[in-house]
Image (cartoon, coloured by chain):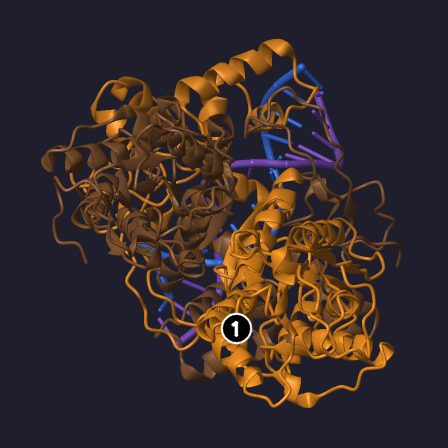
Chain colours: A orange, B brown, C blue, D purple
Amino acid sequence: MGARQHALRGGRRSDRCQAASHGDRCARADRRADREAGHRRPGWRRSASDTGNAGRNGDTIHRRPEGGHFCPEGQARPGLRRTIVRSENRVTINDIARHSGVSRSTVSLVLRGSSRISKATVDKVKASIDALGYTYNRSAANLRTQTSQAIGLIINDLMNPFFTELTAAIEEAADREGFFVYLVQSNEDPERQNKLCTSLVEHGVAGLIICPATGSPRETFDRLHTQRVPVCIAVRPFPDDRFDFSGPDNFRAAELATNELLELGHERIAFLGGERGNPSRDDRVAGYFKALQQAGITFDPELVVESRPSRQSGVADVEKVLGLPNPPTAALCYNDFVAISVMHGLRRNEMEPGRDMALIGFDGMPEAEMSHPTLSTVSLRPRLIGTEAANLVIDRIKSADRPILRRVQSPELVLRESSEAPRQSNSPTRNRNPR
Amino acid sequence: MGARQHALRGGRRSDRCQAASHGDRCARADRRADREAGHRRPGWRRSASDTGNAGRNGDTIHRRPEGGHFCPEGQARPGLRRTIVRSENRVTINDIARHSGVSRSTVSLVLRGSSRISKATVDKVKASIDALGYTYNRSAANLRTQTSQAIGLIINDLMNPFFTELTAAIEEAADREGFFVYLVQSNEDPERQNKLCTSLVEHGVAGLIICPATGSPRETFDRLHTQRVPVCIAVRPFPDDRFDFSGPDNFRAAELATNELLELGHERIAFLGGERGNPSRDDRVAGYFKALQQAGITFDPELVVESRPSRQSGVADVEKVLGLPNPPTAALCYNDFVAISVMHGLRRNEMEPGRDMALIGFDGMPEAEMSHPTLSTVSLRPRLIGTEAANLVIDRIKSADRPILRRVQSPELVLRESSEAPRQSNSPTRNRNPR
DNA sequence: CTGAAAGCGCTTACAG
DNA sequence: CTGAAAGCGCTTACAG
């Protein structure tokens, strides 16, 4: 019978031919060959390895990688070319039609649950489906109907708990609406992000949720807009009013946190971590600034420490302000990671987080609850943002022409131990509502 | 020109017709209509809303949801039926061919980077591609070539940091090989998992990575096997030697951790959390058991506490053993979450984790480094497991017939503060290598 | 209630 | 070096 290889989707049942259900399948194949001779027999099907028993099993076709200068998705990727096999082995709607003695159309209508088909026919067709082990090919149907159930999700880094939760929520919301999500990580690389967009669109996603990488070029979004791809921008407010948006209110979040610390009696409040130019961080610093202004406290630039946020960066950040002549008694931390790292930094300097310095983070990652002391944080509501992003893009898929929507989620202050102790008032000038 | 709606993929450029490039596109459409009259003119294209200017823009087709008794993926899902539009508006390979005055075949060869096409032709075609704003339709190509660049990944819960890291690694490894991943969560529901398998296969994934939900029925895997879908089982050792496997060595991990605690001089070592019947947990308990045996220590069933692991369960678990007449001085915790929760439980009982009880968790989630005290843990190497799972399934996609491979990753003991202090030896019988 | 026919957007062996 | 033709596996308006 000769060597055969299996295709990605085709060829799955071929071994059966050699065993138990040989008769059935091969009889089928022969019948097909008889009926379709003259009508089919396409040239391209014949390959060098076609040794005469054609029509029974798949003729193998080898595709050699051709080193081309132009590749549709703009990037040569390995692994895309493979040995493929004829699909004579794959059970299709035609096989079902033949087996049950009805037309292809009727099978399709049965599959789609049309009420126009008689019960008897439905039963007959369903029996054939079971007997032959048919698998519906939704991508073929999608090609015909110009639909897609895929949503592309581009995030920077799944390992960031904020994005983890966002992703989980998006997956769940998409699933609820009958969509799947293609998950890809841009690694904060605008170039890569651009390629991912192209590639996802080529793969026929129905829509895209993008958390723009820092430094995203306008061109990426211009192209998406030209192509009329339904897009929802998420988390980071890319300045583009042509797309829906779902994200946090960073400004308000920082205001909330700062006001809380002010109410506890703190006046020297630091803002640790994050880099200038990062819109989320800049919005948070702005909210912090505004709250200080409103409380009549002069902004001290020395209390704002910039750093590339990481799982360790907080140590250095807090040590920097600890070295100041008049160190802070409380700190806002760019995110929860920074906050937890700041805790370690404090301990390294014989200070107890929460007691010797009040701390509030941003994000609301679940792990904030597990630190010691437990971390107060402003939850940016990643789950809500994700759910909304999914809903927005799906809604956009369904109605391309509805007005642009921006959904900014209200943050939620989650108070725990790290901000519990009131400021030991050694400066009697201000002391409102200590508790 | 009448009202028009946009499809998922089609219809994107239609607005252009009313504006700037009206001439070009509509001229093209007219030319097409002329050339193809008689040869095309399919009946199904005509809809009730076809008011006479057909051939210029998309005729709208409304599809009514039909409440069917049979649905290919075995489950009625909302949102799958939508208003679709003719794709006269979509730029295809035909448009490029016409615009550049070559055949469809030639365009295709140019797209695929064939060296058989002359430079002049390539340039001409590429110019048309740019001019017309063509987007390659990879799913159409996939249908023709019977290939797919999609891998389905079924995990229980993305919010579990172990699975987060696994997923990130899989996405990265898949990307390296030119694949995308469809991410779905089974929520530990075997029924849902089964539907997800069906649905992903219908969507034409090239392969599947599955972390089997607890209680997965054999049927799910039988069907996958019959369909010859390339599958890699990950993390949880489902007893099925028909599929590749990538997962941790839970037994060895527990042995490692137990030996470490024994070397620190501990004899009363608890195993907290996890439920009997969970293979990972049972393997860990077995490894713990063996290490105790080898050290000549009698196994005390009271030191093994079962519970459904959560972010709080450790509190109750540790309090249970603390109430024992002869409480443990050290504990293995089913996973890092349990361990961190155990820390809280200890503090609630005026005990300091690390000092008053040595703790080692399992998983190696990044947050273990952020706890206080920092958590010793046996890393199960989620990243490695993910990378291997992706490699295995991709390899299987490429060569269906290679032997089954099981890749069990060696765990790695990561010692931190929570297991630092040696046992204050109040029982002088055994005391090996305290440090 | 059912079938014949056309076509979604691609690729490829074959014949010039 | 290039084109004509067939077909991947589906769906649907139309005509019985």
Q: Residue at x 39, y 75 (%)?
A: B117
Q: Position of residue A152 (x, y in %)?
A: 58, 56
Q: Which residue is drawn at 72% across and 49% down?
A: A391
Q: Position of residue B292 (x, y in %)?
A: 17, 35
For the N terminus of chain A, the image quarter is: top left
- Give left or right: position of A38 versus B330: right
The crowd level at tag 1 (other Cα within 10 Å; few <14, some 14-19, many 20+) is some
- Give left or right: position of B304 versus A222: left
- Give left or right: position of A107 versus A40: right
Q: Where does label 1 land, which residue?
A: A188
Compared to residue B206, the image places residue A357 above or below, namely: below
Q: Which residue is drawn at 32% across and 59% down?
A: B416
Residue A239 visible in the current orientation: no
Q: Mark 1: which secondary structure?
A: loop
Q: Position of residue B161 (x, y in %)?
A: 45, 51
- Snapshot quadrant of residue B304: top left
Q: Nearer the viewer, residue C5 or B242?
A: B242
Q: Which of A340 and B166 is in front in this view?
A: A340
